[in-house]
Amino acid sequence: MPGLFDLPHRVVPPVVRALWRPTVEGLDHVPRTGGVLLASNHLSFFDSVVIPVVVPRRVAFLAKSDYFTGTGLRGTLQRLWFEGLDMLPVDRDDTASAVASLDIALEVLRRGDAFGIYPEGTRSRDGRLYRGRTGVAHLALTAGVPVVPVGLIGTDEVQPVGVGRPRVRPVTVRFGAPIEVAGRFDGLPSGRARRLVTDEVMAAIQALTGQEPAGRYNERPADA
């Protein structure tokens, strides 16, 4: 069974790199060891594939719990696929489960692993960058780990919202300098500290992608 779980790690990266040949910039900003948050803009389901493919260490992401509950052979293979890619199930329609997912992320960070997060909370449907939710700051401040901003360009063309099969299109992945939070916000109210960290992360992502901000990251489309 371990071989089956490891199969996606052996097969997916070379296939994705061969087909999409992603352009990668700033990879040296990603620490090779220790807990770290990779905070990215979110344009496509493909985002959660391309980031682990180009990072030289395993990166855990959250995924809809529906991907883990299918039945029959197809459901089993799908579950093994997502588990093999270090995806962690979360029920996005359940508030308690969403809160519990932060605890799962903290476990990942505290054992010295990398965790990927989309501060916007959902995919952008119009290409603009929306206000980050403060979960990214909560994780960084609680675990005392750096945040590496990630800018994805072109993934919305690979797999737009509503399109099941990915297309071959140019993709660029940019990593920014780590944002260190330990000790910088001591003495500030926790809510204020989380907002400041989150806004700093979103500004760094915007600088990497050149995306048009939706206001000052403070608006969201009605369907997001």
Image (cartoon, rainbow, N blue to C red):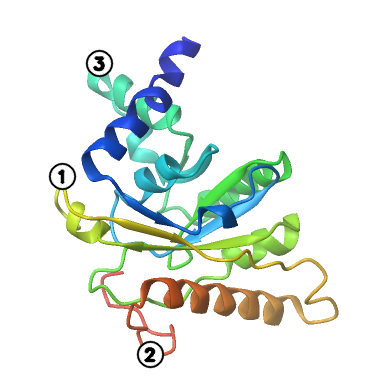
Alpha-carbon span between mark 3 and mark 2 = 46 Å
Circle 1: is it few (<14), some (14-19), or many (20+) Cα within 10 Å? few
| Residue 76 image offset from top left, x and y in percent | 32, 20
Q: Is residue 20 left or right of residue 136?
A: left
The residue under label 2 is 215
Q: Nearer the viewer, mark 3 or mark 2?
A: 2
Q: Amino acid at mark 3?
A: Leu
| Residue 133 image offset from top left, x and y in percent | 51, 70
Q: Secondary structure at mark 2?
A: loop
The residue under label 3 is 73
The residue under label 1 is 164
- Whether residue 7 is situated above or below residue 65 in the rendered picture: above
Q: Amino acid at mark 2?
A: Gly
* Sequence order check, earlier mark of 3 and 2: 3
| Residue 121 image offset from top left, x and y in percent | 43, 63
Q: Which residue: 24% across, 45% down? A: 20
Q: Residue 136 versus residue 40: which sits nearer the camera?
A: 40
Q: Amino acid at mark 1?
A: Gly
